[in-house]
Image (cartoon, rainbow, N blue to C red):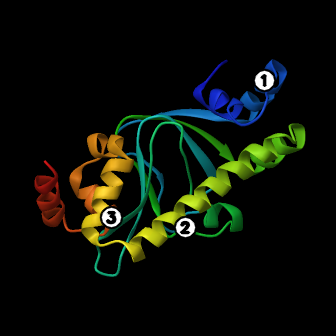
Amino acid sequence: MQTDIIQHIRKFIDLSESDVVVVNKYIKTHQLKKKEFLLQENRICNNLYFVEKGCLRMYFINKKGVEQITQFALDAWWISDYQSFINNTPSQYYIQTIEETKIVSIDSRSLDNLLIELPQLEKYFRTMMQKAVAGAQHRSKLLYEMSKEEFYFHFSTSFPEFMLRVPQYMIASYLGLTPEYLSELRKKSN
């Protein structure tokens, strides 16, 4: 079965057809409706999620009771609460679909077994983790370095697909803006 995840893995490492059979033994595919939860606060995140098609968000509820989005994931992106997944501790986050979404999941035990059977996948997962850390570091730098307006324009030009697929109030949450201020910035850019 040639799925999007197999195509994605093959961008980084070689996989034979027999390797694909092994990968498919350990992964699960899920079709999710809009607004479905993959993870809720205080539950352990037992899976890594690869988005085959769709859009997800990861967020927490801040002390004021407001949702604060920390991450989005579109087609061919990975998402998880890595701290909860790695340490087997309760999560502080929610992961929820924004639109109908097809994902592939792999739980911790399956990942361990997969990496024993196909050690070359260590490189793939290491590369995905490095990309995730690099992205988080870059976002953190931009938050300190740019004004709110500059950060919005950088995000909208770097990730135009998000601007089309994600509701404005969610983009505002991710960028640390009020929906009203984001609306003003959007008017400015048109």
Mark closer to the chain start, 1 or 3: 1
Q: Earlier in the sequence, mark 2 or mark 1?
A: 1
Q: Which residue is mark 2?
A: 137
- Report crowding for label 1: few under 14, some 14 to 19, many 20 or more residues within 10 A (C-alpha): few
Taking depth in this image into account, of 160 and 79 the one nearest to the observer is 160
* Residue 140 x, y percent position in the rendering: 47, 71
Snapshot quadrant of residue 174: bottom left
Q: Return the residue at label 3.
A: 151
Task: Identify whether 26 is placed above or below 48.
Answer: above
In the image, 124 versus 89, the foreground residue is: 124
Q: Nearer the viewer, residue 161 or 18?
A: 161
Q: Residues within 10 Å of mark 2 (few under 14, many from 20)?
A: few
Question: In the depicted view, which residue is nearer to us: 184 or 33?
Answer: 184
Query: Marks 3 and 2, how far apart in space?
Result: 15 Å
Q: Secondary structure at mark 2?
A: helix
Q: Pointer 1: what residue?
A: 21
